[in-house]
Image (spheres, rainbow, N blue to C red):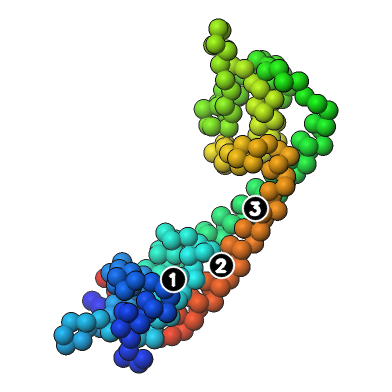
Amino acid sequence: MKASKPSNTGVRRPTDLARVHGLSTQAVRNYERDGVLPPAERSSNGYRRFTEVHAKALSAYLALIPGHGYATSGEIMRAVNRGEIDTALRAIDDSHALLQRDRETLNAVEAAVAILTGTQREPQSRKAVPISALAHRLGVRAATLRKWERAGILQPVRDPATRYRAYSPDDIRDAELAHLLRRAGYRLDHIAGVLRRVRDAGGAEPLAASLRQWRERLTERGKAMLTGAARLADYLGSGVRPTYG
């Protein structure tokens, strides 16, 4: 059964909602179709009639996206429109937990990079080392390094003649950073993502300079979550009437 639809207060056309947010009219229709907006009433000639409630729903959805992403924001809005507030709040909680995990990862990377840059001031030999030497250096088994390779953490080359793994100074740096993060309790897939950042930055020292930007992005996500929460609260207080399947 369907609950009664929003009242006609402040009736708007799809194009009116679209214009305010710089969207296409079709995008607004799609949001209603996908359950991001509550169902609109139809005029006698079949045209959609949106209200202030729909305007607040659209504002809430668009404000949620910078902090939670498209998928989670859609999940939140659909749950709210079904009247499943607890489901929406769980999705928000999960998103906040992910942000907290990212902050903890950043803290761990900052600490690890500080250690690496502090202990690698002496020029390193550009000579590659075999797996046994790297395993001995880290105090781990060779099997552990092979496991890290399968997880995408390490990318050693193979000696053309022997086909044995050869770890360059950059590979050694990656292995040491991975070892520090692993000891801090991070999963291999998470460490692999961190190492991709290191490679993209060009090494541990350039990464140290980019960590500030990483932290700024996390701060912006957190602030966006606050804005999204305020807009969602405004929508919830606007008289939204859930649609029950």
- Tell me residue 71's x, y (percent): 42, 59
| Chain-order first, disc 2 or disc 3 | 3
Q: Residue 11: tell me if it is visible.
A: yes
Picture coordinates of residue 2 (x, y %)? 25, 78
Q: Secondary structure at mark 1?
A: helix
Which residue is the site of mark 2? 225
- Is residue 158 positioned above or below 10 on the image? above
Q: Which mark is in front, 3 or 1?
A: 3
Q: Residues within 10 Å of mark 2 (few under 14, many from 20)?
A: many
Identify residue type, mark 2: Met
Could you say which is closer to the camera, residue 171 or residue 186?
Answer: 171
x and y percentages locating residue 89 in the rendered image? 48, 67
User: Horizontal placement of 26 versus 65: left or right?
Assistant: left
* Rendered-image quadrant of the C terminus: bottom left
Q: Which residue is mark 1?
A: 61
Q: Are marks 2 and 1 in contact (CB under 8 Å)?
A: no
Q: Residue at x 64, y 21 (%)?
A: 167
> Of callouts 2 and 1, which one flags the residue occurring earlier in the amino acid sequence?
1
* Residue type at the position of mark 1: Tyr
Label 3, label 1: how far apart the Cα atoms are: 25 Å
Which residue appears at 56% of the width and 73% of the height?
A: 227
> Relative to residue 96, is residue 76 drawn left or right?
left
Q: Amino acid at mark 3?
A: Trp
Cβ atoms at labels 3 and 1 below 8 Å apart: no
Q: Residue at x 64, y 62 (%)?
A: 219
State how far apart marks 2 and 3 are (Cα).
17 Å
Find numbered disc 2 in the image and state the secondary structure of the residue it sits on.
Answer: helix
Instruction: Tell me the residue that label 3 is attached to.
Output: 214
**Residue farthest along the top direction in this orientation:** 161
Judging from the image, what secondary structure is the residue with disc 3 in? helix
